[in-house]
Image: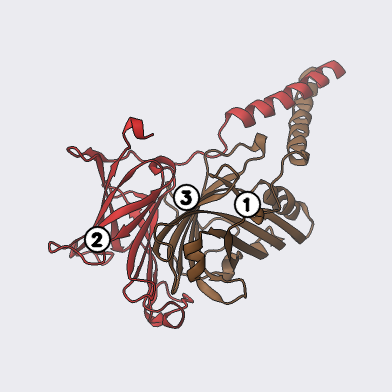
Amino acid sequence: MKYAASLFAGLILGAVLFMLGLYLNPFMGQAKVSPLAVTDGQVMDLSFSAVPANGILYTDHGESAVIPHPDRVAELWEPTVVDTSVFVTELLDGRGKFAGIGIKYLSKSEQTELIKGDALASSVWHIFLPGQGTFMIDQTENFWSYIRDVVIPARTSSGDNWVGSFHSVTTSGPGALGTARVTGGSGVFAGLTSESVEAITVRGYSSVSGPVSMDGNLTIELPEIAAATE
Amino acid sequence: MIKTFVIGTVLGVLGSGALTWYVPAVDLQRERSMISVRPNIGNAELFHINLPRDRILVGLPNIQNSIPAGLKWPGEDYLGDMQAELFKVRDENNVVVGVASRLASATNSSGAFIEWSLHLPARGTIYVEMEITPSADGFRNGEMLAGTQDFLTLSGSVREQFISEVSDDADLQGRIQLEVALVAPLEDEL
């Protein structure tokens, strides 16, 4: 019995050590600087509040810390969409003025491998910019740094929250340089094929209600034709 | 006893590693794809949206008519006549398999457009541009602009049809039917 208890205690310690190693591994991290920061082409910046309550609409399965809103929005409780959220938000241009509307679908990815520091999600933006046109952004996002540096510290803090300054590029693909793929739809973006990157800046997070202060930013590389008409 | 404890610790580390490596962290629910083979033009799959049951959002120029109640839609002042709709999407077995957005504008200064974006979490997303004018028989045809994941290499078309008076049920007053026809590239095109 003594030996069984000793083995069990060892197993628990081993599991805890493994988790700590995973959590503290300094080699797992994400870029804080956008791969498009060194591009020669023109870029368009679109920013938004990534706090779901500040958006136009947010919905998911309804059991998460983040409350869907408006109050009577349909929830995605069906088994095939239970790991998906939908976020609709106003997008602002570089001067902080209204630029358009963005609809973001985000689904957990089966490519997630925590042992490699990959907490992945497949996300798609469907965007309309009045006077310019529409386009879609397809990307893989990695939220490992966000979970490690913001979400877990908030959960383990006595106040159930995290306050600080965290910035990370969440886009990790499908482009070879870790960029998202942009496909133009209508207007000046018709026929466009380009790249983009999404980043988040977090200043406050509550483990009870989710992000309290979080901004998102989309940087989209524009070929000359689209840039000239912007 | 210390030796047993050390062995247990090593086994704990290795076991946790093996568990993290081999057990998938995410396992998305899949429904069987209801695909039919079309002569010479690839595969076809039928999706539909039950109205009003599957509506998530309707953003209209007149904010008062937007859905759901309490929606802070920017409206005509910011978006002109652009209409945005968000739905749950069902397969032929009437099972929800994804979500979709439909954006449309007839007078946007950069040109009129009607677009669909179909997001099926376990399979990928299809981005479609529809023709502005529907055909005489009530259909609206569209062309796939891009696809992701399972749809990445495919090309194809989408046919949209609105069917009214589906049932007496108040939750099922109409139906949007989307017939997606997809073609894989030839081997030498890959």
Determine the colour of chain B. Answer: red
**Quadrant location of the N terminus of chain A?**
top right
In this figure, which residue is indicated by the disc labeled 2?
Answer: B175
Numbered badge on residue A144: none
Q: Position of residue A15 (x, y in %)?
A: 73, 31
> What is the CA distance from the residue labelled 1 to the residue labelled 2?
37 Å
Q: Is residue A49 left or right of residue A105?
A: right
Judging depth in this view, the residue of B63 and B172 nearest the camera is: B63
The amino acid type of the residue labelled 3 equals: Val
- Residue A74 seen anywhere in this rendered image of the structure: no
What residue would you read off at disc 3? Answer: A82
Q: Nearer the viewer, mark 3 or mark 1?
A: 1
Image coordinates of residue B80 in percent, x first then y, are 40, 79
Q: On the image, which quarter does residue A173 sit in?
A: top right
The chain to which mark 1 is attached is: A
Residue at 75% over, 25% down: A8
Q: Secondary structure at mark 2?
A: strand
Secondary element under disc 1, as helix, strand or loop, is loop
Q: Tag 2: residue type?
A: Arg
Q: Which colour denotes chain A? A: brown
Instruction: Same chain for labels 3 and 1? Say yes or no.
Output: yes
Q: Nearer the viewer, residue B83 or B47?
A: B83
In the rendered structure, are the residues bearing label 3 and label 1 in contact, judged by CB atoms less than 8 Å apart?
no
Q: Position of residue A136 (x, y in %)?
A: 45, 57
User: Can residue B41 be seen at all in this image of the molecule?
Assistant: yes
Does residue A211 sit above or below B69 in this rendering? above
Mark 1 highlights which residue? A170
How many numbered circles does the render carry? 3
Tell me the chain of label 2: B
- Where residue B66 appears, as percent x and y from the top left, is 39, 76
Frontmost of labels 1 and 2 is 1
Kindly give the residue lying farthest to the left in the view shown. Answer: B137
